[in-house]
Image (tube, rainbow, N blue to C red):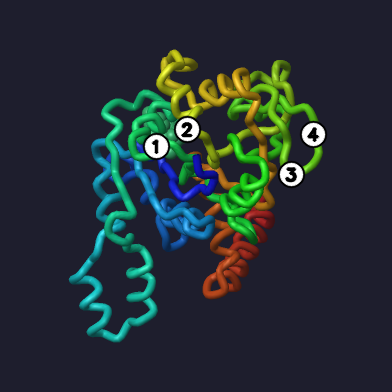
């Protein structure tokens, strides 16, 4: 089995109910952070990590996503004719080379684990990445690249992890780790969304994984878990029990939960402020807005 990670699965078949009514017709992954859809951030991060094959697990109503990665000949011609070279370059960077992107349908939203399992025939006998585009990570070295580098040393399964406040453990998969320090930590156990009192730590798993073919096989064997869904966490937990070959990786960077409204707004502000072309004006606006609100109170 080769150890290099060149394939990534993007499970995007969820219904995005937290963003209704917008997600009635717009897939969540196409929603825009400043001027790029969420999915573009994930693709860029994957490319920076050396991913060559991009596998999207989609569902009914997600065709806008497929169109986004397609050639747009008319638009390109128009931009070329009007000399808008920068925009033309931006558009061309969104087109994926033929054969590098695959779409698989998850017919029924049976959970994240099931979505990943839907891609099993395209993965074969090699390690693969799983990226959730809702988790947008601002980092000097892109998060998945950090993980791929660390994985070259450890092999096995690796999950991205970050510290959360104790009251937030019930929103995440939480790791039970033997040593707390260092970027790479050996995982002894993993619990889905524990109450703070039951949480073995405050180290939470977020949407970046490097998994082995054995974990993919576990997905075909585990029973439905929380909410009647096939949970990715359960397959990883089964691997911890069988092989112990699971590491947590504390990435360097800031993660935004763009699957939630508050997280999406925070990301919009942070990415807007970080942009050279928008930041100064936006910053002035925010300062004025906050000052006006404070004066009115
Ligand atoms: P979420 O738990 O965020 O669910 O899924 P969701 O449907 O996207 O959003 P809400 O909670 O209804 O607002 C986490 C990731 O797993 C994918 C989602 O597309 C998202 O990327 N997923 C979830 C699937 O691909 N299939 C599923 O059956 C469930």
Which mark is in front, 2 or 4? 2
Q: Is residue 78 above or below residue 241?
A: below
Tell me how far mark 2 sits from mark 4, CA to CA.
27 Å
From this view, report whether residue 183 is shown above or below residue 238: below
Q: What element carries label 4?
A: loop
Q: Do the residues labelled 4 and 3 touch (CB within 8 Å)?
A: no
Disc 3 target residue: 183
Pair 3/1: label in front:
1
In the picture of the structure, the residue carrying the numbered disc 2 is 213
Question: Tags 2 and 3 in contact by the CB under 8 Å rule?
Answer: no
Q: Name the residue under label 1.
A: 124
Q: Which of marks 3 and 1 is nearer the N terminus?
A: 1
Distance between mark 2 and mark 3 Cα atoms: 24 Å
**Which disc number belongs to residue 102?**
none
Neighbor class of circle 2 (other Cα within 10 Å; few <14, some 14-19, many 20+) is some
In the rendered view, would you say 246 is above or below 146? above
Q: Which of the two residues, 231 or 138, is positioned nearer the viewer here?
A: 231
Give residue 290's position: percent from left, percent from top: 64, 58
Q: Quadrant of residue 165?
A: top right
Residue 17 visible? The answer is: no
* Image x and y of residue 226, in percent: 49, 16
Q: Which of marks 1 and 4 is nearer the N terminus?
A: 1
Residue at coordinates 52% horizontally, 60% vertically from top-left?
Answer: 48
| Disc 1 to disc 2: CB gap under 8 Å | yes
**Circles 2 and 4: CB atoms closer than 8 Å:** no
């Amino acid at each position: 089995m080769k150890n290099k990670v060149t394939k990534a699965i993007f499970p995007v078949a969820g219904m995005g109910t937290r963003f209704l009514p917008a997600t009635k017709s717009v897939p969540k992954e196409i929603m825009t952070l400043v001027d790029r859809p969420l999915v573009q951030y994930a693709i860029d991060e994957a490319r920076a990590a050396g991913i060559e094959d991009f596998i999207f697990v989609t569902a009914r109503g997600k065709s806008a996503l497929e169109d986004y990665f397609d050639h747009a000949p008319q638009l390109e011609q128009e931009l070329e004719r009007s000399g808008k070279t920068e925009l033309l370059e931006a558009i061309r960077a969104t087109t994926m080379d033929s054969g590098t992107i695959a779409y698989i349908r998850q017919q029924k939203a049976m959970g994240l684990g099931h979505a990943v399992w839907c891609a099993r025939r395209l993965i074969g006998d090699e390690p693969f990445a799983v990226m959730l585009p809702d988790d947008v990570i601002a980092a000097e070295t892109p998060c998945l690249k950090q993980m791929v580098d660390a994985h070259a040393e450890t092999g096995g399964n690796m999950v991205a992890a970050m510290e959360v406040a104790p009251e937030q453990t019930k929103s995440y998969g939480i790791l039970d780790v033997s040593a707390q320090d260092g970027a790479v930590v050996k995982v002894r156990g993993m619990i889905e969304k524990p109450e703070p009192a039951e949480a073995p730590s405050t180290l939470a798993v977020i949407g970046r994984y490097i998994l082995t073919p054995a974990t993919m096989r576990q997905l075909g064997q585990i029973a439905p878990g929380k909410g009647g869904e096939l949970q990715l966490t359960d397959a990883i937990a089964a691997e911890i029990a069988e092989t112990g070959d699971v590491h947590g990786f504390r990435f360097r960077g800031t993660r935004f939960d763009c699957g939630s409204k508050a997280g999406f707004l925070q990301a919009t502000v942070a990415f807007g402020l970080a942009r050279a072309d928008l930041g100064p004006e936006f910053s002035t606006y925010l300062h004025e807005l906050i000052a006006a609100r404070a004066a009115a109170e």
